Amino acid sequence: MINIFPYGDKSSPNDQTQGKLISLAAIIIITFALILSISPMIRYHGAAEGYRFDHWLGVGVWIAAFGLLHYQSSRKLPQRDPYILPIVSLLSGIGLMTIWRLYPNLGLRQTIWIALASAFVFLGLNFPIFLDYLRRYKYIWLISGLFLTGLTIFMGTNPLGNGPTLWLEFLGIHFQPSEVLKILLIAFLASFLTDRQVFVYKKFDILLPTLFVIVSALALLIVQRDLGTATIFLLIYIGMIFSSKGNKILFYGALILAVILIGFAYFYIDIVKLRFDAWLNPFSDPSGASYQILQSLIAIAEGSTFGTGPGLGSPGLIPVAVSDFIFASITEELGLFGAGLIISLYIILLYRAIKLVKITQHSFDRYLALGLTFYFGVQTILIIGGNIGLLPLTGVTLPFVSYGGSSLLVSFIAILFLLIISNRIPANPPIEMVHHRRTIRLSSFLIAILGLEMLVTSLASFWFMPSLVNRPENPRWIVHDRFSERGKILDRDNQIIITNIGQTGSFQRESNHIPLYPVIGYTNPTYGQTGLEESMFDYLRGYETYPAMTLFWQDLLYNQPPAGSDIRLTIDLELQKFADSLLGEEPGAIVMMNAQSGEVLTMASHPYFDAKNLEENWQDLINNEEAPLVNRATQGLYPPGSTLFPFVASTQIELIQQNENPFSIMNGSPQLQTCATFPGSDLTWQAAMTHGCQDVQAKLAEFTDVTQLIELFQNLNFFSPPDIRLNVAQADSPDYDTPEALYTGQAFNLTPLQLALAASALTNQGILPAPRLVNAYQDSNGNWITLSKLGQNSQALDADVAFWITSLLETPDSPHWQITSNEATQDEQVITWFIAGTTADWRGQPTTVVVLLEKDAPILAEEIGLSLLEQSTQISLTNGQQ
Amino acid sequence: MNAILVFALRLLLILLSYTFLGWIIYTIYMDLKRESSLKEEKTTSPIVLSVKIDDEEITKRFRQPVIILGRDPSADFFLNNETISLRHCKVFFRQKQWWVEDLESTNGTYLNQGQVTTSTILTDGDKLTLGKVDITIRINQNIILE
């Protein structure tokens, strides 16, 4: 292995090892940076963005900093541990590159902090005696640390402008005193314990003063809501007291204190309760309390084994990705391999620190090394555990990796201490002393927990990977849509309905016919997807249409799906435009379909919305009583009323044949005001049906057994939702308790689509067609592949019966039948139906149309329906009154 | 092209990272091994073997971890007696204990009158019998040689 940082000719094996390891770390970071440089070319497919170079500044500073530290440590501390510095270099290098990758402006700051922290260590290496000053003036150090932390209560600021005021501002630099307090506290405890060694048996001599110190520090932190740091303090304290004195009473006393404090915090501090609840139940509130942890888990799962590759993932979607959740950010892009690397590096670092505790000759050094072991161990465990959902989230930083100047500086100082301690150990230490076993056990426990965290990480990125990645809370499909075009949506003649505008990185949906949005649906980063955009997602995004190998390589190389496949609808855009213009401003719906094939030619729902300005109009849209977001054709439920007449009539053919007109079955004259439109003075069966005379229908239905009616309606699929590639309303179930409501058609509700299908059965020889809205998709070779219907056609009525009914209903001089009906809904609103279809006399495509208006407007409904039918069949129709 | 290049670099990144880890672990392992063998040497307790052949008493103190007893002049503990094989038995230090093991001698090795068939632990004051020769064992526990 080459050594970029040779140290003279007389370099010792120690220096060699350290130099070679740092050289290797440098090569790793350079490789990382190289990938980051090229990654925009891959994401943008060579368009828009070029290579990026800004982060090389960070690489340069990093190499210089660790080169100098290697040089200086070899000179000043020849006996130091040769592994600590390389581990720190690799950790801080990976952290630095990740921060640059996420937010270049923060990357620049972190670069400056690394330079500063390294300069500090560089100077500190000249004064190893510094440790003794730390010990001698322990009270002064501690009090100044407490004082500075206390100062934040009065003068604290927050670099972000709001949030906890844990920082002090000095010359524009923000500094967090509680970070420094951590290390001062450790130093204080170490020197205190060293001084009191002689009084081993007087427990309270140790407990009381240290307890006073720790409680006052904790009080400060709790007042400032710096609970993460408070937790670390507490754990370090317990660890140090226990392993140094090994007194069980002390240990359990401290442990009980910790439990009481946590319990107290849970009930009195909201954020603690919030974090605990989110930890216990990460899926309970995916957009609120558990949002962060869930996004972190999803990011880890996205990384899977190999990671998306630096610069190719979307760790920016994780909240506070550069500090609290940097572990998840790294894992998304470097995968389980990256997570394993990070955790292993910490384990080795802890191992080396524990080794110092074991072999050092000086009491103070031992306690200090012990405290620093806990400092790194506890902090790493807490934050990684928080990222993977193993522990409640504590807002602490990942040492050396997370963004944050104070934390970085203090971690580097801690490393300086460890280096100095390791240098003081004689070259051939005598055998270890046996009585430190407890220390070793407790600190090995830290390593064991880190191992456990590795295991949990691999569970998230391997075992639970598919279920996490496919969660609806995973927003990465939005990024995919921006970088790789979604398929277009075309009408039956390949006219474009929805396409994309913009360029790689900023693709957006663009509609050529906005009124179709309730059917097409929206696709939006905030509100998700609806309509065809949702139901056809796997086709539009290409997951269903490309070979698995293509998808695999696309994912591996680009972390993007290929450009999505176009889909072709059965909608006829010309007819659709005509239908939308006819419906105008009226709230309502139109469904027109080919009665034989079930192909939907027109599906309109008004009022509609424009998906383009969804964010701005969202409040208006969801508060609008007319519900523009709902596709009324498939999701609106309305009582069918007297549109059921022809179906009811199909059960009483003989009765109708025996009676020339409805008068004879009615007791007295029928109430003509129940008809939707005036049926003429001589009421025929044809007129009663066409004009939706409800009491005639009800009277006729009385002659039929209820179970027979229910069976008929079941055959017409009134109680099961249609199988169509769209979200449809849950179908109603019939109300058996009130047969009267069943007779008048008010016992259950239907969607316009359901009624259009039933009407098609009349027109199409009794065969109820399965609906079809999506015709075909274009595969990766450009061929159109027909999509099969989801449902099956079924014989709902006898062909003879259907023929007889349509003949009875047929409008004179015109090959069509029609029914107009108006009903009062449950909420006292009046709606109007118009249904029509071609008859056997018509030689063209059998066609049906359903118009629904959410108001009492039979004439308008009839006008709209007939115009549409005329337009589609190109025949001139006469309505019944002529 | 870029994508393939980056993919190769990503593999390289993983490879290098784990080389880094593996290397640290390997060197630490080698360090540990060296230390433990160093420790082992240091903690070898001295053993004193005394024997009386033809009224001539021989007492010898050993530090090395393996001692060969036999009639062969090159043996670590040379015993000039007809009843003793050339390489009669082996006394060695392992797991902080001294052990004796017979080296397929003609007349066998006896420890406190019991024949030694497998490796057996020796304790202070034991009597080892090789042929017709008695050897007294003195072990000073936990004394560290410099």
Image: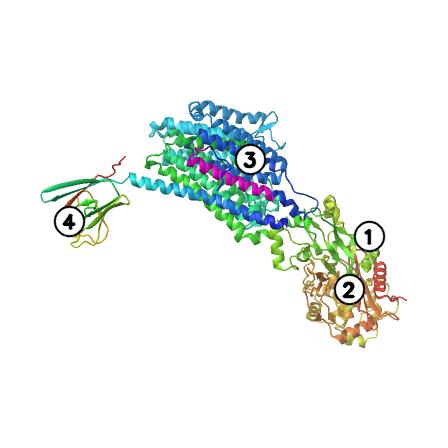
Which residue bears the numbered disc 4?
A: B129
Q: Main SS type for the magenta part?
A: helix
- Determine the CA span between mark 3 and mark 1: 65 Å
Report crowding for label 1: few under 14, some 14 to 19, many 20 or more residues within 10 A (C-alpha).
Answer: few
- Say which label, 2 or 1, has the lower sequence index: 1
Report crowding for label 3: few under 14, some 14 to 19, many 20 or more residues within 10 A (C-alpha).
Answer: many
Outermost right residue: A882
| Secondary structure under the numbered disc 1 in the rendered image | loop
Mark 3: amino acid: Trp
Mark 4: amino acid: Thr
Contact? badges 3 and 4 (CB < 8 Å)? no
Viewport quadrant of the C terminus of chain A: bottom right
- Say which label, 3 or 1, has the lower sequence index: 3
Residue occupying image coordinates x 75% and y 75%: A799
- Determine the CA span between mark 2 and mark 4: 111 Å
- Say which label, 3 or 2, has the lower sequence index: 3
- Determine the CA span between mark 3 and mark 4: 70 Å
| Secondary structure under the numbered disc 4 in the rendered image | strand
Contact? badges 2 and 4 (CB < 8 Å)? no
Q: Is residue A657 above or below residue A30?
A: below
Quick check: B115 left or right of A590?
left
Q: Nearer the viewer, residue A715 or A195?
A: A195
Question: Which color scheme is applied?
Answer: rainbow
| Secondary structure under the numbered disc 3 in the rendered image | helix
- Determine the CA span between mark 2 and mark 1: 22 Å
| Secondary structure under the numbered disc 2 in the rendered image | strand
- Determine the CA span between mark 3 and mark 2: 68 Å
Q: Chain of mark 2?
A: A
Stretch in magenta = A9-35
Is A11 within the magenta?
yes
Q: Can you give x and y, in whole percent of width and height, for residue A520 in the image?
A: 73, 55
